Amino acid sequence: MLHSLKSRKLALIAGVSLAVTAAMTLGAHAQDTVKIGFSQSLTGFLSPNGKQALLGQEIWADRVNKAGGLLGKKVELKYYDDKSQGSEVPGIYTKLIDVDKVDLVVSGYASNQIAPAMPVVMSKKKTFISLFGLDINDKFKYDKYFSIIPTGQDTKGSFTQGWFDVAMQQSPKPQTIALTFADAEFSQNACEGARATAKKLNLKIVYDKAYPPPPKTTDFAPIVRAIKAENPDLVMICSYPLDSIGLVLAAHEVDLKPKMMGGAMVGLQATPFKDKLKGKLNGIVNYETWVPDKKQMYEGAEAFYKEYQSRAGAAGVDPLGYYLGGWGYAQMQVLEAGIKGAKSFDDAKIAEYLKKATVQTVVGPIKFGAKGEWADSRMMQVQYHSLTDAANLETWRGMSYQTVVDPPSLATGKLIYPYEKAMK
């Protein structure tokens, strides 16, 4: 009986000891790791861009960890698929912060996913570095918000300002414009900026209508026929990937030939969408944020894209990563700079450092203005040309099919005008 009691006591002590050791081990692991949380669109209509952004983020984490981590801590990325649905986002960030106990957060890709996260991150007083959100902070005015998109401080206008600048240099000058846009956060904001610019230039707006984004709209021919009936000189399109493709195909179907077309069409920058359209892209003038021109090979860019492209096949993502891969990496470079500059993981200290810093990234130097937007715009407009249906990955890899027409400091050639001439 005495032996039995002693055995139980020893077993109890051993159990407590193991539990304490396990708790200490877990605690030590937590102390040695910094967890960064975010949502990302890994399924749904935003996933082609969301997945390439994620690979960029993962390449950053691997690079940092190989170099010893951040302030001596190993980086761990914690993320969930928001399914391209903004309604999923608030719950994800609540879980990341309250349940997963992440140390820091950043945004996933796109305005529609960033805006729903803002009330949560603001309530938790987290520094928030967003990825390709258009003028999100105009509404929230949050002092710890930083935007990774090269729009400058005139966020709504900058997506299309260069497009108008190039159009108004033509002779004779265009007189009329049609505006069509998806009824969604980004498209509404971009077209609001375009509308304001058109009015400043005294362009007559002959068509100005929103359409429900896919899957609610699948047939774009009626929209394009209505635009064609107004015979505008210019057609400004503010769209997301699936509607961008639908509108280009419909324009060819109904033989729409304005003098210039494009503007703020998301999706045309990504390799899979270019592959769907190929020669039908000819003549379109549309925004870009980075192209593989020698003027834009900033420090680390060549090495990053080499690494990205070597991993893209296994990851099942855009094979080049020019649109969101580099920007996902740059988003994390900015967070890294904030942590190192502040010498802390404290959100307030990181935010204070970033407000004053100029951060060197693979997409160029980034300095923030008053609302957390870039101090200066670096948006571009490119024109597609000389494409046939034989276009392939090697075509998209270079610059032979696209010309940067604005801004002048990054231009690689002149606009082919009108649109019909460049279609050939």
Image (tube, helix red, strand yellow):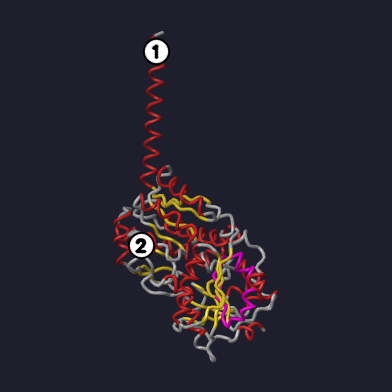
Marked residue nearer the N-terminal end (1 or 2): 1
Does the magenta run of residues contain 407?
A: no
The residue most toward the bottom is: 171
Q: Looking at the picture, does residue 85 appear above or below residue 391? A: above
- Circle 2: residue type: Ala
Residue 49 is situated, as x and y percent measured from the top left of the image, at 55, 62
Give percent across and percent down for residue 295.
Answer: 46, 79
Nearer mark to the viewer, of 1 and 2 = 2
> In the rendered structure, which segment of residues is drawn in magenta?
226-247
Q: Is residue 231 magenta?
A: yes
Find residue 98 and report its horizontal and vertical position in percent.
40, 43
| Residue at 46% in and 72% down | 193
SS for callout 2: helix
Q: On the rendered structure, is 301 left or right of 392?
A: left
C-alpha distance separating marks 1 and 2: 59 Å
Quarter of the N terminus within the rendering: top left
Amino acid on which disc 1 is placed: Leu
Q: Quadrant of residue 279?
A: bottom right
Find disc 2 in the rendering and name its residue.
Answer: 337
Q: Residue at x 58, y 73 (%)?
A: 397
- The correct choice, above or below, for 210 with respect to 160 in the image is above
Q: Which residue is mark 1?
A: 5
